[in-house]
Image (tube, rainbow, N blue to C red):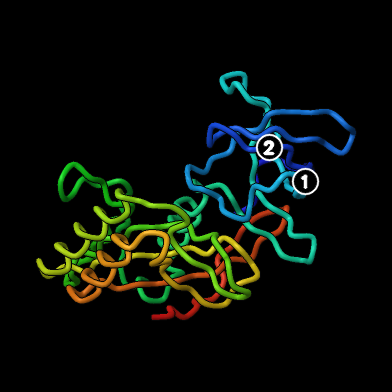
Amino acid sequence: MRFQTELVPARLIRRYKRFLADCTLDDGREVTAHCANPGSMMGLAEPGMKIWLEPNDDPKRKLRYGWRLVDHENGHFTGVDTSLPNRAVKAALEGQKIHALADYGTVRPEVKYGENSRIDFLLTDPGLPDAYIEVKSATLSRCPGLVEFPDSVTARGAKHLGELAQMARNGNRALLLYLVQRTDCTAFSVAADIDPAYAAAFADARAAGLETLVIGTHITPQGVTLANCMPLNG
């Protein structure tokens, strides 16, 4: 999927209040961009980093720029917009382009399930078990070639794992899809040292029948597309 408007390069001054980032454009102007990422962004928000912003002229938006990419200046990029994975995965599911889920003809986003929760996607098709799909954006990399999730403690993520495990016990398919929003990694692992409770919930859910799918991405300042699956370590 392509970005709606052409991205412009900038340098990060600072990220603050989680959702705001002060940046310097190439012409020297300082602007504030919206950062659509509630995580810690460990290793991705250092002052001076080259980043890419998406301009907008929507009068309903308070900020005229959205932070979309980190440019590692070595040919690799990381996508920092956590709303993008659901849009990209939705398009892929509707186009039946994810092999493990290609037999499903109906894709419904944001369906209520569990205890006051919503599943990212519910897939249905006659003769097949319902498939409950939760999507997570993975961007943390502390070792070369390895991407990890989560990058901070996520009680919400552990809750989702418990609910997915119950869906699997009920005879449905329950699948956690990690979309790797960086181009310099080839394997995935759960960051157990960052959130032991999440790691425990992940292990329990897999024992209950949770399926996992880790999908890489091709990222450029023009857009993001899904790439090949990658292995899960551990």
Q: Residue at x 88, y 32 (%)?
A: 28
Q: Residue 150: where, in percent of width, then height?
A: 43, 58
Which residue is tagged 2?
14
Q: Is residue 214 left or right of residue 128?
A: right
Residue picked out by circle 1? 48
Residue 115 vertical position relative to residue 29 in the rendered view, above or below: below
- Horizontal and vertical percent position of residue 61: 58, 23
Taking the spot 82% from the left edge, 36% from the top edge, the residue there is 25
**Front-most of 20 and 167?**
20
- To which quarter of the image does residue 175 belong? bottom left
Residue 108 appears at what percent x and percent y? 30, 51
Residue 184 at x, y percent in the picture: 65, 70
Please name the amino acid that badge 2 sits on.
Answer: Arg
Q: Is residue 78 above or below residue 126?
A: above
Q: Looking at the rendering, in which quadrant would you find the C terminus?
A: bottom left
Q: CA distance from mark 2 to mark 1?
A: 8 Å
Label 2 residue SS = strand
- In the picture as drawn, the residue positioned furthest to the left comes out as 170
Label 1 environment density (alpha carbons within 10 Å; few <14, some 14–19, many ≥20): few
